[in-house]
Amino acid sequence: QVQLQESGPGLVKPSQTLSLTCTVSGGSISSGSYYWSWIRQPAGKGLEWIGRIYTSGSTNYNPSLKSRVTISVDTSENQFSLKLSSVTVADTAVYYCARNWNYAFDIWGQGTMVTVS
Amino acid sequence: EVVLTQSPGTLSLSPGERATLSCRASQSVSSSYLAWYQQKPGQAPRLLIYGASSRATGIPDRFSGSGSGTDFTLTISRLEPEDFAMYYCQQFGSSQYSFGQGTKLEIK
């Protein structure tokens, strides 16, 4: 079955760019009509959708983060990636990648903690 | 932007009891676009309900969803010990997703 795994630095300095990659295993990122999303969760708080990408490269972003977010896809590597620029301590969170299905998120990665400090 | 408000913030019940969790939207949401998740500490959220009332694969039938327009409900008919967790509703609209702030279901 399809599984997702986030990877990237766990510590980022303020004002720098956070970069994460989500690797899809157990299936092709290009098969089926799926969007692929990034979601984050600060410690002890709720979930915030960051944005999504289709395998064609079409993207949608959360308006509150749009000016700082770039999501890209590499179908040859079966991966999609997140870049968040000009980070502050407020961007400290667990970052999840997830598959969109029927306007919900049916498969999630385990999450990766990113600290801005 | 559609804002989802979940209530109550915390629900204290005993195993075997019935749980009713509410999710209210700031504007009408298509039933096709409303989902519920369960999250336990240290874990990723798990999809329970999509399309307001359809159970995801492997979800026990004690979980049910209902509602339309701006008011949606997640019901757990008979609480099992493993059901005590955080629950989030989520909507999709105008190519955007948003989540409610969550309801904590705790053991009384």
Image (tube, rainbow, N blue to C red):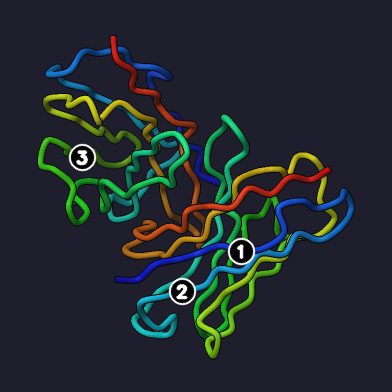
Image x and y of residue A20, in percent: 66, 64
Residue position marked by numbered label 2 in the rendering = A24
Q: Residue at x 29, y 15 (%)?
A: B107
Distance, label 3 to label 2, CA atoms, is 30 Å
Q: Secondary structure at mark 3?
A: strand
Residue position marked by numbered label 3 in the rendering = B65
Image x and y of residue A57, in percent: 58, 82
Q: Residue furthest bottom?
A: A76
Kind of residue indicated by mark 2: Val
Q: Up-down: is B31 above or below A44?
A: below
Q: Secondary structure at mark 2?
A: strand
Image x and y of residue A15, in percent: 89, 53
Q: Is residue A21 left or right of residue B57?
A: right
Mark 3 or mark 2: which is in front?
A: 2
Kind of residue indicated by mark 3: Gly
Please name whichever residue, B71 or B50, is drawn nearer the observer in this view of the structure. B50
Kind of residue indicated by mark 1: Ser
Label 2 Cα neighbours within 10 Å, binned few <14 / some 14-19 / many ≥20: many
Mark 3 or mark 1: which is in front?
A: 1
Name the chain letter of the residue that bears numbered label 2: A
Image x and y of residue B31, in percent: 28, 50
Name the chain letter of the residue that bears numbered label 1: A
Label 3 Cα neighbours within 10 Å, binned few <14 / some 14-19 / many ≥20: many
Name the chain letter of the residue that bears numbered label 3: B
Q: Is residue A82 left or right of residue B22?
A: right
- In contact (CB < 8 Å): disc 2 and disc 1: no
Q: Residue at x 50, y 77 (%)?
A: A54
Residue B95, numbered circle: none
